[in-house]
Amino acid sequence: MQSTGWTFRAASAVANGTTSLTITKPSGTVDNDIMLMWLTHKGLSYATVPAGWTLVGQGISGSTRGELYWKRASGEGANYSFTGLADTSLGYIRSYIGGLLS
């Protein structure tokens, strides 16, 4: 695979929720952009994420959990819904041009 470097394209607004969270895809995101989604929430378990998102890493500090996922944009809808959250949550998505070419 060849790396082409990454260039920031757009970011979503920060979404706030409780037991579920809906994050809007960043405006201007096009097919093949790489999207990174950050999610922070309180609770005993990690979030249930929509199909197609790949876990990069997750961690916990006290009762706060942090999760990072990636996805290649591919004609999907404008929103992503996350469930399984126990309490206060927030998340956002950033889109990048480039990444890995196969």
Image (cartoon, grey):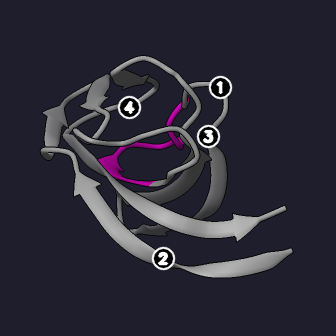
Residue 45 within the magenta-colored segment of the rendering: yes
For marks 2 and 3, give the one nearer the viewer: 2
From the image, tell me which residue sits under label 4.
85
Residue visible at 61% across and 40% down in the picture? 53
CB under 8 Å between discs 3 and 1: yes
Q: Could you tell me how far apart the alpha carbons at marks 4 and 1 are, in whole angstroms?
A: 17 Å
Q: Is residue 49 above or below residue 64?
A: above
Q: Tell me if mark 2 has few (under 14), some (14-19) or many (20+) residues whose alpha carbon lies within 10 angstroms of its own.
A: some
CB under 8 Å between discs 2 and 1: no
From the image, tell me which residue sits under label 2.
6
At label 3, the amino acid type is Trp
Mark earlier in primary sequence (4, 1): 1
At label 4, the amino acid type is Leu
From the image, tell me which residue sits under label 1.
51
Q: Tell me if mark 4 has few (under 14), some (14-19) or many (20+) residues whose alpha carbon lies within 10 angstroms of its own.
A: many
Q: Could you tell me how far apart the alpha carbons at marks 2 and 1 are, in whole angstroms?
A: 24 Å
The secondary structure type at the circle numbered 1 is loop
Mark earlier in primary sequence (4, 3): 3
Q: What is the span of residues highlighted in magenta in the rendered image?
A: 36-48
Q: Is residue 57 above or below residue 40?
A: below
Location of the N terminus by quadrant is bottom right
The secondary structure type at the circle numbered 2 is strand
